[in-house]
Image: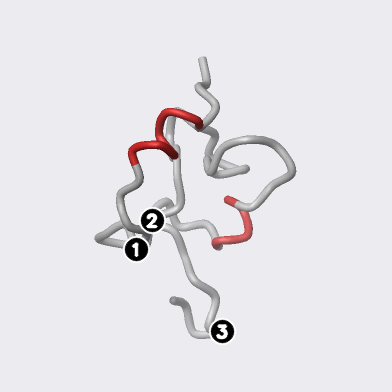
Amino acid sequence: MDDAGVRLCACGHPEEMHEHYRPGTDCGACGSRACGSFRLDGFDDRPSNPLRRLLRRRHG
């Protein structure tokens, strides 16, 4: 988190950049190739879900 209490992804962008109206959890600024999903700096805070990986939109 930064000083304002905003959760930052390891990519450096706020969590809201990973919340969008299209499929996937990639960063809206970095794109799927640079940052495919939201993760806190140093670890992924979501439990592993193999079904999510299968259903997530593939890019490129």
Of all residues, the one furthest to the top in this rendering is: 60
Task: From the image, state whether disc 2 or disc 1 is nearer to you.
Answer: 1
In the rendered image, the vertical position of residue 3 relative to residue 51, given as above or below: below
Tell me whether circle 2 and circle 1 mark residues in contact (CB < 8 Å).
yes
Residue nearest the viewer, comparing 1 with 21: 21
The residue positioned 52% from the left and 21% from the top of the image is: 59
The residue positioned 44% from the left and 37% from the top of the image is: 36
- Distance CA(mark 3)–CA(mark 2): 18 Å
Pinpoint residue 57: horizontal percent, then vertical percent.
55, 27
Of all residues, the one furthest to the right in this rendering is: 21
Taking the image as shown, residue 27 lies to the left or right of residue 1, namely: right
Nearer-N-terminus badge (3/1): 3
Mark 2 closeness class: few <14, some 14–19, many ≥20 residues within 10 Å? some
At mark 3, the secondary structure is loop
In the rendered image, the vertical position of residue 41 relative to residue 20, given as above or below: below
In the rendered image, the vertical position of residue 60 relative to residue 1, given as above or below: above
* Residue identifier under label 3: 4
- Distance CA(mark 2)–CA(mark 1): 6 Å
In the rendered image, the vertical position of residue 4 relative to residue 33, given as above or below: below
* Residue identifier under label 1: 45
Q: Quadrant of residue 40?
A: bottom left
Give, as a three-letter code, the residue at label 2.
Arg
* Residue identifier under label 2: 39
Tag of residue 56: none
At mark 1, the secondary structure is loop
Mark 1 closeness class: few <14, some 14–19, many ≥20 residues within 10 Å? few
